[in-house]
Amino acid sequence: MKKDSLLSLNSGYSPELEDTFKNMIKKSLDIEGHWFIRSSKKKQHSWYFRYKDKTTGKRKDVYLCKLEEGFTKCCDITFTKLNGSYVKSKNKKPLVDIINQYILDLETRGHSLTGDISIETSKNRNTGLKDFKKYSIDTNLTLNDVDGKHSRIVFKNWFETLVRRGLKKSTIKTYLKSVRLFLEDLGKSTEYPNGYGLIDINVITTDFQNELLKTIRGKDKEEIIKEYREEYYIKVRQLFTLKVREIWENYCNNKRLDPIRDSNGKVNQPSNSLGSDVVYFISLVQIITGTRVKEVLHSFVNESSMTSHREMNNTPYSEYYSYWTYREDYEMYFLTIRFKNKIRNVPVKETIFSYHRPPDGVPHKYRKYERKQDGYEGVYETDLIDVLFELSSNEYFMFPSPNIYSSKLQPRSMNYYLTTFNNVIKEGHKTYQYGINTTHNLRSYYISFMIRNGVPLLDLCEIVGHSLRTLEQRYKREDLRQKSDVMRNTDYTSIIKQTYWNQK
């Protein structure tokens, strides 16, 4: 049977793929040959590889697998069989055993008080490693399969399974990175802190990983130019501000919020628990400061509560954190954030108005009108963060879990919050029409607004925790209206005439 027959094409064969594998075999094993299909008397079709043995000079045909098992698997088996006689004894060890040990080591590094990675990072890396572990079991990978240039085929084949499963590009990138770092540590000698010295040659580089990612169809984030309009930013910010004022006015008037009930109608949360309305407060903080959602959602009420909670849970120093502080010298609250081993202080200043007097103990100012408005002689002004302190029912977190019985010492769940954001903000208020589809869009909108309103870029970088280059690459939004106004309002005729006469 011909290799380009319909049956073989259905099994994944292509001339381009064959050339790729041929070149890899030539470079890694110095063997030249080709694949072909052989039919048996029972009309069963199998893949074979034919090459010339350099020692005896005789032609050899090596059985690989059945046709229906696919051309990719056929090529994997080719490497295993051709390289089998040269495998070092230590490299015959099943790869899954080494992955299991490495996963345990990562967890230890994450929980160590002096660890070089955080618990969250170790969990993220282990997610990708566990997927690769399952692949290594399914394909019977040994340590030899990831030692040398032929390991690129293993890496590439696993990558293709991730793509076929329909995983997001960002998820695939995270998975590839976790395995790439795993192989780096296997290649490092034991003299390094995390070195294993189990493989001689590691060829899985960042460049190779990125080349694979480029083959995924669809645009990268950097290629998607999002439109920006200042009126969109203002509308969305006003939406959050007015909703927060409405909630605060109701609380000041009734001294409690509408109770949160479970499916049976039972009230099992404190009277000042925000429920799903918490999305308005967190979104408002994000759009006026450019913070990440986790930096606000999981923030501690102050530094001492953070220290107490971390000591109680034996949290490593390398772990991320954020907490609130009031600076009397600036008359302002700051959110102190430790992220990726960098600490920054983000100032937060927003006033929330109410016609009714806030509860006793809540700092506020009273401003009297020159004449009555809506039947009131004045308005009470309260700082947004003081409002949050009043509505927070926890000694540790600004936004604690609403379940005060089973999770009273934990912050709100990130996944649950993101679901609430999609339902209440994106779909409920249809903010997608303004380009707000995710919580991170609030951060990018803030950055675009500040850049276009003349805020010094270095100051902005310190507030949002990014470099100038990152601001340009990740948070660029085009203001098409502003561009069109420039073209419409510029008198090009006068400019051309002036340039012409100056040349004369």
Image (cartoon, grey):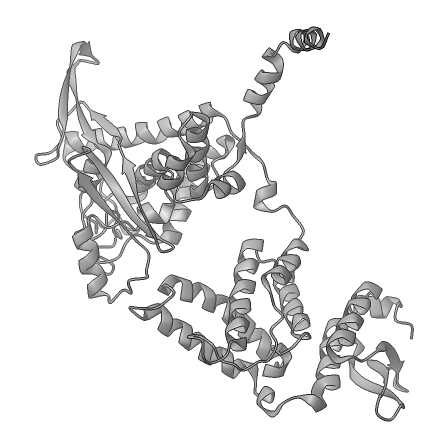
Q: Nearer the viewer, residue 13 or 105?
A: 105
Which picture quadrant has residue 282?
Answer: top left
Residue 106 percent across, percent down from the top left? 41, 72
**Residue reaching furthest left?**
360
Residue 22 x, y percent position in the rendering: 80, 72
Q: Is residue 142 visible?
A: no
Q: Quadrant of the C terminus?
A: top right
At 34% from the left and 54% from the top, the residue drawn is: 413
Q: Is residue 469 above or below residue 288?
A: below
User: 38 or 218: nearer the eye?
Assistant: 218
| Residue 170 seen in the current view | yes
Residue ID at (86%, 83%): 51
**Residue 125 spot, x, y in % from top left:** 46, 66
Quadrant of image for the N terminus: bottom right
Number of marks in picture: 0
Q: Pick out the residue farthest to the front.
A: 504
- Residue 296: x and y in percent read 31, 45
- As drawn, is 78 to the left or to the right of 461? right
Closer to us: 289 or 69? 289
Q: Quadrant of residue 202?
A: bottom right
Residue at the spot 66% in from the left edge and 11% down from the top edge: 492
Location of residue 76 with respect to 118 vertically, above or below: below
* Horizontal arrangement in the rendering, residue 86 relative to residue 23 (left or right): left
Residue occupying image coordinates x 31% and y 71%: 112
167 is higher (above) or lower (below) than 105 = above
In the image, is residue 371 above or below residue 176? above
